[in-house]
Image (cartoon, rainbow, N blue to C red):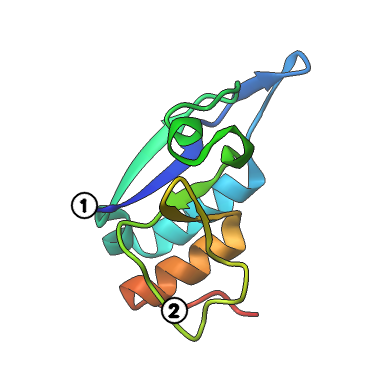
Amino acid sequence: MKDRLFLLRADWVDQDRTWFCMACAAVEGFLAYYPAVRDRLEIAYLPYGRPRHPVADLLGEANQNLPALILAEPFDHPDLREGDLQAAGGLTFATNEGPITRYLAARYGVSPPHP
């Protein structure tokens, strides 16, 4: 099983205009720097509206913020900060660009983001 990354699709509509998610764009930028990491992930692009299935199904409705990364297996590394990884529904996950990119860098052996 691969780590599963969930991102918002670009150009979603809210308040009668189109938007993109800055946090999702930051993760996309990280993956552009490291395409070999992208190749090792299962990536799904979800619509803006809630509930955001399958994230809500896997982690619960309280944990459907995107970006979200669900880990395939437990992982511990000194570059991960307390609170980077969370648990719900028997799964370990990270949300927001900082924790996600720190995890991906540590797990896949690429340069981490500067603190």
Residue kind at label 2, given as amino acid type: Ser
Provide the secondary structure element on which disc 1 rests. Answer: loop
Q: Residue at x 42, y 72 (%)?
A: 105
Question: Residue 31: x percent and y percent?
Answer: 41, 57
Vertical comparison of 41 with 12: above or below: below
Q: Residue at x 36, y 64 (%)?
A: 34
Question: Farthest residue toward the top?
Answer: 16
Residue kind at label 1, given as amino acid type: Met
Q: Quadrant of the C terminus?
A: bottom right
Q: Residue at x 36, y 72 (%)?
A: 107
Q: CA distance from mark 1 to mark 2?
A: 24 Å
Provide the secondary structure element on which disc 2 rests. Answer: loop
Vertical comparison of 80 with 62: above or below: below
Question: Residue 57: x percent and y percent?
Answer: 45, 31
44 vs 62, nearest the viewer: 62
Which dot marks residue 111? 2
- What residue does disc 1 label? 1
